[in-house]
Image (spheres, rainbow, N blue to C red):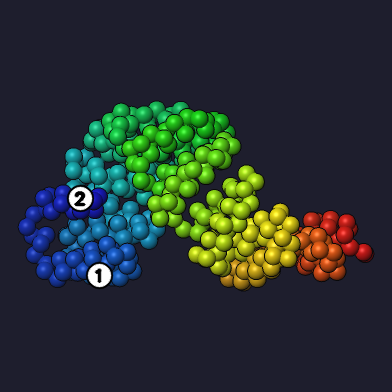
């Protein structure tokens, strides 16, 4: 039984028979639930609003609507619906702890940590053995930039209550590996790896856990182990072009150019619109002295970067726009260097000048070294 089903069952038990008098409300509710399960949240919201309108005492409709709002990241509206349910049940009622828990999560997502902490403390008071509430409190404390030790102590309480929950070990690994603020202390990658290994032991086919461990391995310069995790995930068939690309970069870093080229080509076969895939393939070919092939790949990268840049809303997504333009300029410089190796100096200087628009400092360095004023 999933979280929503469990909560709905509880509400059905709590509410008097009058709640179910509105047949139309229940029909709209069933339609909304079906659309929610299909992740068609816009249509689900239309139906659930009609259910609420048909019977404003039907608390199940408010619960489902809160879940829909959360899926749409409309957290304030979801909080409003949870508040309505809690007011009807009673803030101090033993049955309200799960709704306080859910409301705390939405407040935390809105970065209203003070309100989130108040709700989660109330939920824990009502149900002190609910391990997930302790884990959520730990996360709130961590996000609130409290000293890391405070969050870890609360998370330890969650693990003591439920020692077989892989999510808790993943969360503790995240706490240990991450420093959001100097007050949180230095990262402890060794402790993080111990915890993520425990999480994987409990959930051995969870690719998300392997992806996290791979990042920890890379941070601690254990690239061979990172490659092993990527290879394991890819062998299961549950992978995308990003994992192929990431493994290719690791192969390239470790000097295994042929394997890197194979992975970059496989990534491109899955998605041929990413400029970065072609750029790295060009770098790998350049390193093998296959300069004309490298030039062809850099040209493909430049064309893809142009397309990606054209689709970015520069005003609302400046960071992405800047990153793409820097990669675009870098691809011109790299193509220029492959042309230098073939003694195509005029074409190389053309490339260096093209890079001037987005990275004048670096482009001028190459122009001064290889090109006449």
Question: Could you say which is closer to the camera, residue 139 or residue 66?
Answer: 139
Tell me the residue that label 2 is attached to.
1
Question: Could you say which is closer to the camera, residue 34 or residue 363?
Answer: 363
Confirm whether residue 22 shows in the render.
Answer: yes
**How far from the left and from the top, in percent, is residue 1?**
20, 50
Question: Could you say which is closer to the camera, residue 74 or residue 163?
Answer: 163
Residue in view at x 53 percent, y 60 percent:
267
Residue in view at x 12 percent, y 49 percent:
14
Q: Quadrant of the C terminus?
A: bottom right
- The answer to which quarter of the image holds residue 138 is top left
Tell me the residue that label 1 is attached to.
47
Distance between the alpha carbons at the discs numbered 1 and 2: 23 Å
**How far from the left and from the top, in percent, is residue 39?**
32, 64
Residue in view at x 52 percent, y 42 percent:
226
Q: Closer to the N terminus: mark 1 or mark 2?
A: 2
Left or right placement of residue 313 versus residue 142 in this view: right
Q: Which mark identifies residue 20?
A: none
């Amino acid at each position: 039984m999933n979280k929503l089903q469990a909560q709905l069952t509880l509400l059905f038990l709590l509410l008097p028979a009058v709640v179910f008098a509105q047949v139309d409300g229940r029909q709209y509710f069933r339609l909304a639930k079906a659309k929610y399960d299909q992740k068609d949240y816009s249509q689900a919201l239309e139906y659930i609003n009609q259910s609420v309108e048909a019977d404003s005492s039907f608390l199940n409709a408010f619960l489902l609507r809160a879940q829909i709002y959360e899926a749409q990241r409309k957290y304030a509206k979801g909080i409003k619906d949870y508040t309505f349910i809690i007011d009807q049940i009673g803030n101090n009622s033993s049955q309200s702890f799960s709704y306080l828990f859910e409301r705390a999560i939405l407040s935390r997502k809105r970065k209203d940590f003070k309100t989130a902490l108040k709700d989660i403390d109330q939920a824990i008071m009502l149900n002190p053995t609910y391990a997930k509430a302790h884990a959520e409190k730990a996360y709130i404390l961590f996000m609130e930039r409290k000293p890391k030790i405070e969050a870890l102590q609360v998370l330890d309480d969650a693990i003591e209550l439920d020692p077989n929950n892989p999510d808790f070990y993943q969360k503790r690994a995240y706490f240990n590996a991450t420093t959001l603020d100097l007050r949180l202390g230095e990262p402890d990658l060794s402790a993080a790896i111990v915890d993520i290994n425990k999480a994987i032991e409990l959930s051995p086919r969870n690719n998300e856990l392997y992806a996290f461990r791979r990042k920890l391995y890379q941070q601690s310069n254990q690239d061979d182990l990172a490659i092993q995790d990527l290879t394991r995930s890819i062998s299961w068939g549950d992978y995308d072009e990003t994992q192929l690309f990431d493994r290719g970069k690791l192969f390239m870093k470790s000097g295994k150019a042929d394997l890197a080229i194979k992975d970059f080509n496989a990534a491109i076969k899955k998605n041929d619109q990413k400029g970065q895939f072609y750029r790295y393939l060009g770098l790998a070919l350049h390193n093998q002295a296959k300069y004309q092939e490298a030039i062809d790949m850099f040209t493909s990268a430049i064309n893809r970067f142009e397309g990606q840049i054209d689709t970015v809303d520069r005003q609302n997504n400046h960071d992405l726009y800047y990153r793409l333009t820097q990669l675009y300029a870098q691809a011109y410089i790299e193509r220029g260097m492959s042309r230098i190796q073939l003694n195509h100096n005029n074409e190389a200087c053309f490339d260096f000048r093209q890079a001037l628009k987005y990275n004048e400092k670096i482009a001028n360095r190459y122009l001064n070294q290889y090109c006449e004023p």
